[in-house]
Image (tube, grey):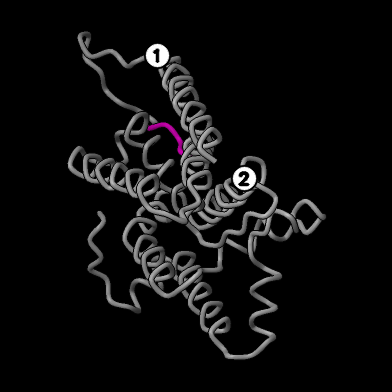
């Protein structure tokens, strides 16, 4: 599921949205590397500067998703997209996939604006990528027919490592990571259809839909605790 065996041409044909995002990120990064004052000015105008958002520069909630601080930042996020985004583009189809990706990223940047200081500056697609992981968490919990147990364990392990790195690494937009994960999870049920028919025996009755809301409440409580901890340590 997460092992890419397609040729480059096949990858482009099967996953046009993921390909477009990766190429766009690379092109934007290359433009920003041009040793010219205009490149520096452009980066400053497009970065996620909270003071700019407060002044009405709303595009700063969108454009940081496609900017990266350095090559390693770009490389890590692009590899994450190449490995983990294609299955979701297949499940959701292109339109729904790009909607969840962008909305998760924008809402993560909005959360950054709300919880971080006015002088805070951030770039990167991590908030949107964590939104995709939020969708995976929903799938693992409530749409098990979309993913097998082995891949479920893999995605949860990768997510756990990502969360540990989020809190352990300096200069990381922790708010964007956590909120992106939360928003992806919340958006997922709007687009992930239930299986049309599943046979259950008398002893294997389906769980009630209320279980989703119970899990969601607990996740909201955990996220609230994490965000409170972030605020207290800022």
- In the image, 111 versus 83, the foreground residue is 111
Pointer 2 local density, CA inside 10 Å: few below 14, some 14–19, many at least 20: some
What residue do we see at 37% from left, 53% from top? 169
Q: Which badge, 1 or 2, is on the more N-terminal residue?
A: 2
Q: Which residues are magenta?
A: 191-195
What distance separates the C-alpha of mark 1 from that of mark 2?
Answer: 39 Å
What residue do we see at 49% from left, 65% from top? 17
- In the image, 140 versus 41, the foreground residue is 41
Residue 2 position, x and y percent, is 26, 56
Query: SS for tag 1?
Result: loop
Pointer 1 local density, CA inside 10 Å: few below 14, some 14–19, many at least 20: few
Residue 63 position, x and y percent, is 64, 64
Residue 35 position, x and y percent, is 58, 90
Q: Residue furthest top?
A: 202
Q: Residue furthest left?
A: 150
Residue holding disc 1: 208
Label at residue 116? 2
Foreground disc of the pair 1, 2: 2
SS assignment for the magenta stretch, majority: loop
- 68 left or right, relative to 148: right
- 51 left or right, relative to 2: right
Residue 65, above or below 176: below
Residue 201 position, x and y percent, is 21, 14
- The quarter of the rendered structure image containing the N terminus is bottom left
What residue do we see at 47% from left, 56% from top? 171
- Residue 64 lies in magenta, yes or no? no
Query: SS for tag 2?
Result: loop
Q: Is residue 191 visible?
A: no
């Amino acid at each position: 599921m997460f092992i890419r065996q397609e040729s480059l041409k096949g990858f482009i044909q099967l996953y046009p949205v993921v390909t477009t995002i990766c190429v766009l990120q690379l092109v934007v990064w290359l433009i920003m590397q041009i040793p010219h004052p205009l490149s520096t000015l452009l980066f400053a105008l497009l970065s996620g500067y909270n003071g700019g958002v407060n002044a009405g520069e709303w595009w700063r909630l969108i454009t940081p998703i496609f900017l990266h601080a350095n090559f390693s930042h770009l490389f890590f996020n692009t590899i994450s997209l190449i490995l983990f985004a294609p299955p979701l583009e297949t499940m959701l189809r292109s339109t729904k996939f790009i909607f969840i990706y962008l909305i998760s990223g924008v809402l993560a940047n909005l959360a950054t604006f709300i919880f971080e200081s006015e002088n805070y500056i951030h770039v990167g697609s991590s908030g949107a990528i964590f939104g995709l992981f939020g969708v995976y968490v929903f799938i693992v919990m409530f749409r098990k027919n979309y993913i097998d147990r082995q891949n479920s364990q893999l995605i949860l392990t990768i997510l756990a490592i990502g969360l540990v790195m989020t809190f352990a690494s300096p200069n990381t937009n922790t708010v964007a990571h956590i909120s992106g994960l939360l928003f992806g999870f919340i958006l997922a049920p709007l687009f992930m259809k239930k299986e049309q028919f599943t046979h259950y025996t008398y002893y294997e009755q389906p769980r009630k839909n209320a279980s989703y809301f119970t899990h969601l409440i607990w996740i909201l409580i955990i996220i609230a605790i994490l965000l409170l901890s972030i605020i207290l340590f800022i």
